[in-house]
């Protein structure tokens, strides 16, 4: 069974390759699309996180075939690499070691907050070939606890990004889905100084009457003034159709990590 795969559709906007280590998540996000996609009851998805069958064995086989690839692998789409169960199973650390051994660049996206710090020692060995991202939706504990009850609170996710930034690890933020634009803008302003890259996307079925053109113009002016790299996803581009974006700001591979040129033996 192949573990590393090529995402399609909207998922492709995040990464050319991806890998999901777990079945289920545990962050219990009410807006999560995954249970419908994989045909799993939401209650089971939220409360019964498990290791995928023979995950490490199959991942090792896939990674060996891709050794030295110029394609970034994202963890994860259908789960979170630092969901609560990872504290027990520790599959993410094992996967990182396999990716490092096979010179495969890795992007991590998580709502796990400081759970990710447990792998800092391995992550640092990747150098410029890894980036650590947080999904940020709400700027306050009340909304976060109500909608993402199993995830780290917003301030903890921001603290995680600060730790990695101080350790010279590339950081990024996914603002998707944008549910409360004012909160998104507030979060963006809070983390500008310690986040390197940003991605923005909205719910495709969000039919609210809102001035998305003004919102996107506001965020891109902030980011361009700070010389920050960012990508506006297709769902948001369609809603903000009047906004003029640069080619790189709508290029799905603009923020993809560089391939390994050479790994020093001291890293292993």
Image (cartoon, rainbow, N blue to C red):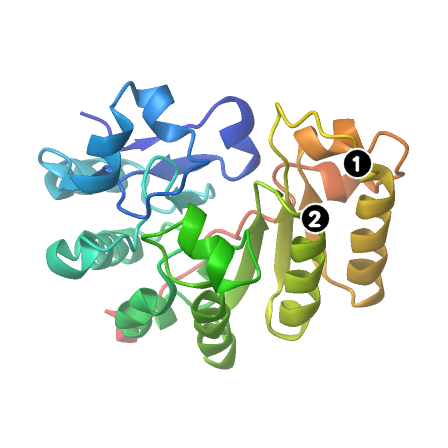
Q: Name the quadrant containing residue 249.
A: top right
Left or right of 22, for residue 81: right
Screen quadrant of the N terminus:
top left
Left or right of 256, for residue 103: left
Q: CA distance from mark 1 to mark 2?
A: 9 Å
SS category of the residue bearing label 2: helix
Q: Earlier in the sequence, mark 1 or mark 2?
A: 2
**Which residue of the protein is positioned furthest toward the bottom in this rendering?**
166
| Location of residue 16 in the rendering, given as x and y in whole percent from the top left corner | 48, 35
Image position of 183 with respect to 7: above or below = below
Q: Nearer the viewer, residue 67 or 178?
A: 178
| Location of residue 4 in the rendering, given as x and y in whole percent from the top left corner | 31, 34
Left or right of 85, for residue 250: right
Q: Name the quadrant containing residue 229.
A: bottom right
Screen quadrant of the C terminus:
bottom left
On the question of residue 152 being in view, the answer is yes
Whether pointer 1 and pointer 2 mark residues with C-beta atoms closer than 8 Å, the reply is: yes
Mark 2 — residue? Answer: 181
Label 2: how many Cα within 10 Å (few below 14, some 14–19, many 20+): some
For image coordinates 76% across by 32% down, the residue present is 237
Mark 1 — residue? Answer: 210
């Amino acid at each position: 069974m192949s573990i590393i795969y090529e995402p399609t559709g909207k998922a492709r906007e995040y990464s050319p390759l991806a890998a999901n280590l777990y079945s289920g998540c545990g962050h219990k996000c009410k807006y999560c699309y995954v249970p419908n996609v994989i045909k799993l009851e939401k209650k089971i998805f939220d409360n019964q996180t498990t290791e995928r069958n023979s995950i490490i064995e199959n991942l090792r086989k896939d990674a060996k075939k891709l050794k030295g690839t110029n394609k970034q692998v994202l963890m994860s789409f259908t789960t979170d690499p630092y969901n609560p169960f990872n504290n027990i199973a520790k599959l993410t650390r094992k996967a990182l070691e396999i990716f490092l051994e096979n010179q495969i660049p890795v992007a991590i996206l998580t709502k796990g907050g400081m759970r990710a710090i447990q792998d800092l020692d391995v992550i640092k060995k990747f150098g410029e070939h890894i980036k650590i991202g947080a999904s940020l939706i709400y700027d306050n504990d009340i909304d976060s606890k109500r909608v993402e009850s199993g995830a780290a609170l917003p301030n903890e996710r921001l603290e995680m990004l600060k730790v990695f930034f101080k350790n010279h690890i590339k950081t990024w933020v996914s603002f998707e889905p944008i549910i409360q634009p004012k909160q998104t803008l507030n979060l963006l302003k809070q983390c500008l100084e310690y986040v390197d890259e940003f991605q923005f996307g909205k719910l495709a079925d969000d039919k609210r009457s809102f001035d998305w053109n003004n919102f996107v113009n506001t965020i891109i002016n902030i980011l361009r003034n700070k010389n920050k790299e960012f990508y506006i996803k297709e769902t948001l581009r369609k809603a903000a159709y009047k906004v003029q974006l640069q080619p790189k700001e709508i290029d799905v591979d603009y923020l993809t990590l560089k391939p390994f040129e050479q790994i020093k033996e001291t890293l292993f």
